[in-house]
């Protein structure tokens, strides 16, 4: 497979040239404060505070009495608890980022390519011929990376990208590069994101890619990482195109779904006319099933430790 994802992204990029619109420091409650509050009498409150603060002090007094009626932690136990919490926080903070120096040549080469103002990064000399280029239009000021064992084989893969939270509160993991090392020791990048095309990691072995080919064409794919071939294989390809029967009306959207394969322009000039695919509501419903299946997988980037490279 001559890099399915690379081909699709490149095709979409070319299509876009068509001139159309497109703490553990949890608040440690000092027992001394609680004891002082408990020892405060109502008479002291009345004589020392103004009428406006009487209600406040009364509330404090009532709270203090309620607290005292329960089993109070001793100063020693509170201090011990605080010590344990601080120790846990320190342990988390001191966990170093996962690293794998096998990928150093690729990372260093990527940094240099950005400094030189290149548009793409092909990879070091020992890069597999089927490797996808890393697009640098999204990395002009640097990049972030982490490591992931996506197939649970004990070997890390390099994930170049970033995470952010969308408007609905969902964590999104943008993939600008997903690099494996072949049995021959070569680097092989399997994914990239472009200005008008994005690839995201969903969970488990699944990736989601989508891109625009113009105002009336949009494609989205779900890919699955195949350990045996060290490649991304297409699970489903959703093509959305539209017609504008009347300029005064909204476009009519058509959904076409291909399972296990991609839309072939040479076989069907318009995906909506392809008899070998699912169409309409059936296509959209089936696509949603694929998304749900991929999203149900464990997200291995949920607690990732990112390393930032500023250029």
Image (cartoon, rainbow, N blue to C red):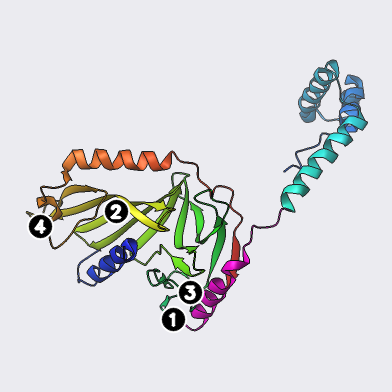
Secondary structure under the numbered disc 1 in the rendered image: loop
What secondary structure characterizes most of the magenta part? helix
Residue pointed to by mark 3: 140
Q: Is residue 30 visible?
A: no
Residue 61 place in picture, x, y as percent: 83, 22
Number of residue marks: 4
Q: Nearer the viewer, mark 1 or mark 3?
A: 1
Rendered location of residue 104, percent (x, y): 59, 71
| Magenta range | 95-118
Name the residue rendered at 64%, 57% in the picture: 98
Observer able to see residue 154: yes
Locate residue 86: give its quadrant: top right
Q: Residue furthest front?
A: 184
The numbered disc on residue 220 is 2
| Residue tagged 4 | 247
Asked whether the residues under the numbered discs 4 and 3 touch, taking CB atoms below 8 Å apart as contact, a structural biologist would say no
Residue that extends furthest to the left in the rendered view of this protein:
245
For disc 1, the marked residue is 118
> Along the polypeptide, which appears first: circle 4 or circle 3?
3
**How many angstroms separate mark 4 from mark 3 (CA)?**
39 Å
Residue at 77 percent across and 43 percent down: it is: 88
Q: Are marks 2 and 3 in contact (CB under 8 Å)?
A: no
């Amino acid at each position: 497979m001559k890099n399915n994802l690379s081909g699709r992204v490149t095709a979409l990029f070319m299509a876009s040239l068509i001139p159309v619109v497109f703490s553990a420091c949890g608040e440690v409650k000092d027992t001394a404060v609680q004891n002082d509050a408990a020892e405060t009498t109502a008479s002291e409150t009345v004589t020392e505070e103004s009428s406006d603060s009487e209600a406040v002090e009364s509330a404090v007094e009532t709270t203090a009495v309620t607290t005292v009626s329960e089993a109070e932690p001793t100063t020693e136990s509170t201090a011990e608890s605080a010590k344990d919490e601080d120790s846990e926080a320190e342990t988390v903070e001191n966990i170093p980022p996962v690293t794998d120096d096998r990928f150093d040549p690729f990372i260093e080469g990527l940094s240099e390519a950005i400094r030189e103002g290149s548009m793409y990064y092909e990879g070091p000399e020992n890069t597999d011929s089927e490797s996808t280029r890393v697009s640098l239009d999204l990395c002009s000021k640097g990049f972030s990376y982490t490591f992931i064992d996506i197939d649970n084989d004990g070997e890390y893969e390099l994930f170049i990208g970033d995470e952010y939270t969308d408007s609905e509160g969902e964590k999104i993991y943008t993939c600008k590069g997903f690099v494996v090392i072949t049995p021959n020791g070569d680097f092989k990048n399997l994914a990239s994101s472009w200005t008008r095309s994005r690839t995201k990691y969903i969970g488990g072995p699944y990736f989601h890619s989508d891109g625009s080919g113009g105002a009336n064409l949009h494609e989205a794919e779900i890919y699955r990482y195949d350990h045996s071939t060290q490649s991304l294989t297409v699970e489903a390809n959703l093509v959305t195109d539209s017609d504008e029967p009347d300029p005064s009306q909204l476009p009519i959207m058509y959904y076409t779904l291909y399972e296990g394969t991609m839309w072939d322009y040479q076989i069907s000039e318009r995906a909506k006319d392809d008899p070998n695919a699912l169409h309409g509501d059936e296509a959209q419903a089936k696509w949603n099933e694929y998304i749900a299946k991929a999203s149900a997988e464990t997200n291995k980037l949920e607690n990732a430790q990112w390393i930032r490279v500023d250029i």
